[in-house]
Image (tube, grey):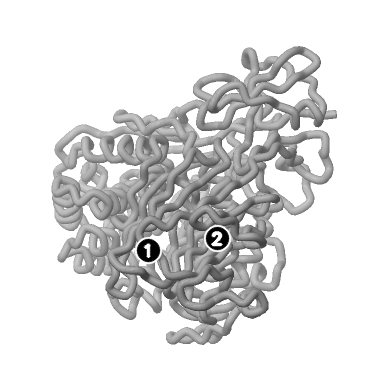
Amino acid sequence: MKGRSSMNKKSNRTAISRRRFLQTSSLAAAALAGVGARGRDAWCAEPPSNSPLTEFSYGDVSIASDPHESQLMNTHHVLMALSEDSLLKPFRQLSGMSAPGDDLGGWYTYDPNYDYRKGFDEGFAPGCNFGQWVSALARVYAITGETATREKVLRLNRLYAQTITPDFYVKNRFPAYTYDKLVLGLLDSHTHAHDPQALAILEQTTNTALPHLPGHAIEHDHPWRTDKDPADASWTWDESYTISENLFLAYQRGAGQRYYDLGLQYLDDTAWFDPLSRNENVLNGRHAYSYVNSLSSAMMAYFVAGSEKHLRAARNAFAMLEEQSFATGGWGPDETLRAPGSSDVYDSLTKTHHSFETPCGSYAHFKLTRYLLRATRDSHYGDSMERMMYNTVLGALPLEENGKNFYYADYNFDGQRVYKEARWACCSGTLPQVAADYRINTYLRGRQAVYVNLYVPSTLRWNENGEALSLTQEGDYPFEDLVTFTVTSSQPAELTLHFRIPKWAQGAQIFVNGARADGLAEPGRFAAIRREWKTGDRVELDFPLRMRLETIDAQHTDTVALMRGPLVLMAVKQEPKAPLPKVTREQLLAAKRVSERQWLASSASGPVTMLPFTSMGSRPYTTYLKAT
């Protein structure tokens, strides 16, 4: 396989030049300032290390933010209420078994006569979400320790194990996609729900699936199943190019050498990762969510196999993606990546309401930015994750018990927040995972160090060299400027706390126990404070949340989104199809806050209400305005 020779089983990573530079510069600055002694505050970096940052466990973080917790509890309630016979029904049907219970309907149901040309949604991807739902349940068990949740995970795995037959993959339009989700569900059952049979069921799943998968990554829309109707394009929509991430993860979590080898085998190198590693932009026309999701496979190739090529590919692709992203952080109008320098993203403001595949896209985005942040310690990836969280998925409509799910965010000039018509679509699988993952996105761990990545009211509890510590985060960010952290420690402990200072946060300040730390809050990097921390120590971050404008692209500089800190403030329209208000840049930048979550901007036709996506409700709105 092309590119395999560049990867060894043992990591041969070398330090990234930028990281070396930052470490050297920070240590030199600390020395010049005469700080760094034990027990004194210091602006410093960790000791030089090639090791990536690691994730805390789901149970290490408790969140005290209503929007985040409501999303977790909503999705968990829906999953716990699902009938197990209904969940197993398409597996049993596809395998020719007796299948009691009601159909869930929507994408999840099995229809042997399905034809997307006659009716796209009903029966599109039977059983597609099962592995994701088991994964989400296992993660919630790790968060809550709730016995009923673990018992449901174990029951579902054992019932599923009875349905594993070749026919499930022979009859399924998405054998690789579904296998990929099953792998992750079983891995999370093993890791987070401590299912002693999960890895054995995984092995059974892999043995059954492999003969019915392509032998290598097949590009989207490329036919490979010669026994299927060539006129039915849906048989070419499988996503084998995404599966390496979870195969590498299986190897990493102890499932065996075969998963390492399979991870290498399914890397989409020739058409995708090789040109990206050379900084060739090959995004145009590709299915947005799945190809961004596949970049996590490149990152796992870096973490597990030591491939610098795949790290370059992921970094380059992410930079290309940002160049065609909306101000919200979303991307891929009509689920399609676009040509560099084109007007496609601007044109989408009038041509589609399918602007961003929100739960799936945010899940892929969060994984990728978390991997990149772990590998590089570059705070830019945290900035992007924060923007995505507050402006897209945190405002998704709740998952309903009948399978209605929020799918697309709408950035059209005539936007509205609505459910997708189809039930149990792919986004009903990723939203529960996203809701659980806010915890592992908020804090990351280094050597004698904690990185604070997201500003969400929460408490992190962990052990450092045998000492029990906690870090409690409070505040109403991103609506208020101040975020406060309080340390609790069983004994004084020396370590470094790193705080992400967003690129937009010019004039940010940091206070340690009331004393201002001058020169520490540099926008676009992590501020590092190393000292001996003890119970009651406080760190306060003051982020000036100023208004600014971001244009849709370089060719349409009059089309702007109003930003305040990481938030996009969207203009409420009086009614659907109403004309855009006529505003100037000065009027937008002078918008006045009139309540906790609402601003008013002047316009030629009167005041315009500006709201964040999370507060929009069912009102018509526009994300972008034409400003003179």
Residue type beneath disc 1: Lys
Which residue is depicted at the point 65% across and 72% down?
Answer: 277
Considering only vertical position in the picture, is 337 above or below 9? Answer: above
Which residue is depicted at the point 77% across and 44% down?
Answer: 553
Front label number (1 vs 2): 1
Quadrant location of residue 432?
top left
Q: Is residue 58 visible?
A: yes
Circle 1 residues within 10 Å: few <14, some 14–19, many ≥20: some
* Residue 292 place in picture, x, y as percent: 55, 56
Please tell me which residue lies in front, 435 or 448. Answer: 448
Which residue is depicted at the point 44% across and 65% down?
Answer: 450
Disc number placed over residue 345 in the picture, else none: none
At mark 1, the secondary structure is loop
Please tell me which residue lies in front, 123 or 51. Answer: 51
Q: Is residue 265 visible?
A: no
* Residue 417 place in picture, x, y as percent: 52, 27
Residue type beneath disc 2: Glu
Considering only vertical position in the picture, is 460 above or below 251? Answer: above
Mark 1 or mark 2, earlier in chain: 2
Image quarter hosting the C terminus? top right
Q: Which residue is mark 1?
A: 534
* Residue 108 place in picture, x, y as percent: 33, 40
At mark 2, the secondary structure is loop
Query: Label 1 vs label 2: CA separation?
Result: 54 Å
Q: Which residue is mark 2?
A: 219
